[in-house]
Image (tube, grey):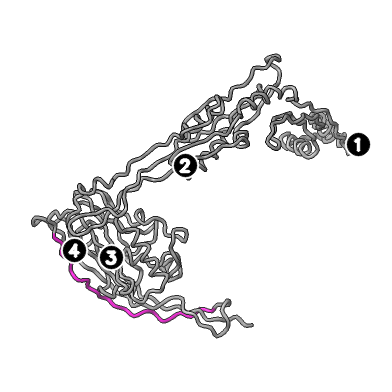
Amino acid sequence: MGERIAPKIDYNESKLDSFVEEISNSKDQPAVDSTIKLNKGKLQISPSKTGLVIDQGELKKDLISTFTTLNTKSVSLKKVTATPIVTEEASQEALKTTQSLLTAPIILSGAGQSWKIDFKRQFDFLSFTTNQEEPTPLVNVEGKSLSFQIRSVEAESKPDARRLIVTFNSTKVGKFLNVIAKDVDQEAVNARFEFSGSRVVSFVPHQIGRKLDKNASLLALQKAINVGTKKINLPIKTAEPEITTEKVNNLGLKELLGRGESKFAGSIANRIHNINLGSSRLHGVLIAPGEVFSMYKAVGDVENSTGYREAYIIQNGRTIIGVGGGMCQVSTTLFRTALKAGLPIIERHPHAYRVGYYEQNSAAGLDASVYFPSADLKFKNDTGHYLLIQREINLSKSTLAFEIYGTDDGRVVKMTNPSVTNITPPPKALYQKDSTLAKGVVKQVDFAAWGADAFFKRTVTRDGKILYNDTFYTHYQPWRAVYLVGTKVG
């Protein structure tokens, strides 16, 4: 006969602990500590309550015994009494402290506004912990380390006894201050100017920036609750704009340096709307000496939320309906303006194919495509003086123009007319079946365009010396028309 060998049984202690914890969480009736509540405008002590919880140590021991002996008997859940840590008696002094702290509304003032912090809100700013717990740390509101605590009445009980103390809940206060900051904070805004005759006159004055000092506000509010102050002037930081209205006559905006134009006849209503909106956000923009102008930075996000509408755009090799269609009319016009002003072009992207709008008053090759933020139009102000962008738009005549004003430093700009070669016809139209369209319906979703290569040269000189000698090349792909043919029946 063979020898009988008892199997060796092992178990995963981590998984066992998790299992015991899961069982306990579903079956325990934890003890409830006494605390301070606000009930219908009155402070009250909530009662403590004894709990009944599973003895996790016994449960774990029984389970191990069952596993290792292969005993299939059921395991009983033994429960023990859970005593609350904080009783009603231990909450009495916290009640007195809270009552002494919350006596009247607190009024915050700043930036011409005011906010009332009523009794309920003040109570919400407090937290209650035991004297043997670490108090809730203050939130790092603006990258600074803060530490303080609400005063508390000393207990008459033994030092090691559990009692409830009042602390300052900076997390909730921080959220409240974030709401206030939305009303207070504003970015500093440079003055924007309009050129009229031989002078520049302000049409949008500068705006001083301001920002709520959240850390200082947090400390001020804690102090107000702590010592009974009921009126607080919020600490607000100010920031001067770079260009103030008073500096207008020192900017060197004396002469017209360049003017660029384009036409957008035949544009749909949404495209016209976008052209008007986008170009308006460039009107009056100042470019500092040495600054690289970014159209994306100047215009901002092009989204529905910023006022733009859907019109045709070029994206991923297709002409599609997208938000901001028409912004390339704006960038093309501004590109032409910067060219004629003799400014160095830092970034310019031609279109993938020829677009009829940009050839209504020009040969091919003088366009600039933008698709923010990946494709931008950038040029540099190397004149040593400020530059001012002005817009002229005539919606009835479908014309757009930009002008750049500054100080004439004697540079001379010469540009050749664009040379257009290698003109190629568009490929044969593509017809694609579409099950979402009714049978027999044909819908054009892309439009044919002839391909070509275009280039022009620009030379910028000053005092007979060449500053820039540029050649701008553009390759336009021949573009096929695309039609969707409906196949849906019924």
What's under tag 3, amino acid-wise? Glu
Reading the image, the residue beneath label 4 is 458
Q: Is residue 354 visible?
A: no
Q: Is residue 24 above or below residue 278?
A: above
What's under tag 4, amino acid-wise? Arg
Q: Is residue 400 visible?
A: yes
Q: Residues within 10 Å of mark 1 (few under 14, many from 20)?
A: few
Please state the extent of the stretch shown in magenta in the rendering: 412-433
What's under tag 2, amino acid-wise? Gln
Reading the image, the residue beneath label 2 is 113
Which label sits in the foreground, 1 or 3? Answer: 3
Q: Residues within 10 Å of mark 2 (few under 14, many from 20)?
A: few
Reading the image, the residue beneath label 3 is 392
Between discs 3 and 4, the one toward the N terminus: 3
Reading the image, the residue beneath label 1 is 1
Q: Are marks 4 and 2 in contact (CB under 8 Å)?
A: no
